[in-house]
Image: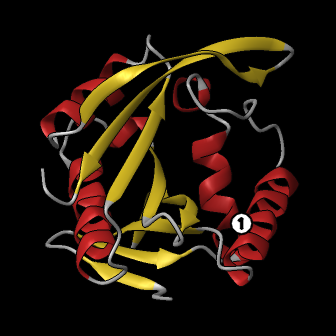
């Protein structure tokens, strides 16, 4: 499976433990983690543990997460990837996060477009899903901009900090 993707302004590279310092800075920002299914990180070891967990899923062929690197400055500005890969059913679930200081500049849509292109053209997937909390207006706008279709609500689908959260599910098909 691929470990790198390139766009006009970004380099998506499979996460590695040496990214932990940069990713910790992003994942320790409450504005970034507000709608993620993890609590705000409080130390870099949590970032290292997350990267190791994601690497195990990669080794099993179940997921791949990329560090989003701004090509111009070589700075890690977020992460994205396939949270789950289901080749039997030709589908994947995507996820993404961007450092707050880079919000609103089109980096997330550029990274996600790259994931979509790779999923449909190279991985030969038919369906890409994204699950998002209904209150996450920025993520919903992004998905709508990328022609994802709202399919419905998954009631109390996920437990975060002891509280069950509803999630909205969006999808994009190869034929869309």
**Residue at (61, 56) in percent of width and height:** 23
**Above or below: residue 110 compared with residue 57:** above
Camera-side residue of 106 and 82: 82
**Can the viewer see residue 159 in this picture?**
yes
Residue 83 vertical position relative to residue 12 in the rendered view, above or below:
above
Task: Name the secondary structure under disc 1.
Answer: helix
107 displayed left or right of 131: left
Q: Decide which of 69, 168 is in the foreground and name it.
A: 168
Where residue 46 appears, as percent x and y from the top left, is 84, 51
Image coordinates for residue 111, horizontal then vertical, percent: 29, 60
| Relative depth, front residue between 136 and 48 | 136
Q: Is residue 161 left or right of residue 16?
A: right
User: Residue at coordinates 14% horizontally, 57% vertically from top-left?
Assistant: 175
Residue on which the image places disc 1: 54
Q: Position of residue 159 (x, y in %)?
A: 78, 22
Q: Is residue 71 visible?
A: no
């Amino acid at each position: 499976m691929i470990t790198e993707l390139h766009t006009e302004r970004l380099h998506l590279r499979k996460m590695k433990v040496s990214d932990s310092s940069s990713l910790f800075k992003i994942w320790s920002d409450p504005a970034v983690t507000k709608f993620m299914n993890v609590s705000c990180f409080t130390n870099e070891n949590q970032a290292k543990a997350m990267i190791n967990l994601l690497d195990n899923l990669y080794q099993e062929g179940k997921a791949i997460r990329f560090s989003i690197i701004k090509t111009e400055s070589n700075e890690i500005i977020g992460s994205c990837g396939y949270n789950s890969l289901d080749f039997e059913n030709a589908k994947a679930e995507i996820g993404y996060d961007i450092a707050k200081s880079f919000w609103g500049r089109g980096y997330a849509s550029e990274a996600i477009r790259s994931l979509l292109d790779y999923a449909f053209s190279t991985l030969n997937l038919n369906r890409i899903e994204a699950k998002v909390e209904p209150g996450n207006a920025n993520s919903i706008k992004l998905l709508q901009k990328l022609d994802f279709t709202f399919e419905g609500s998954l009631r109390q689908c996920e437990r975060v900090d002891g509280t069950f959260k509803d999630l909205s599910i969006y999808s994009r098909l190869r034929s869309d």
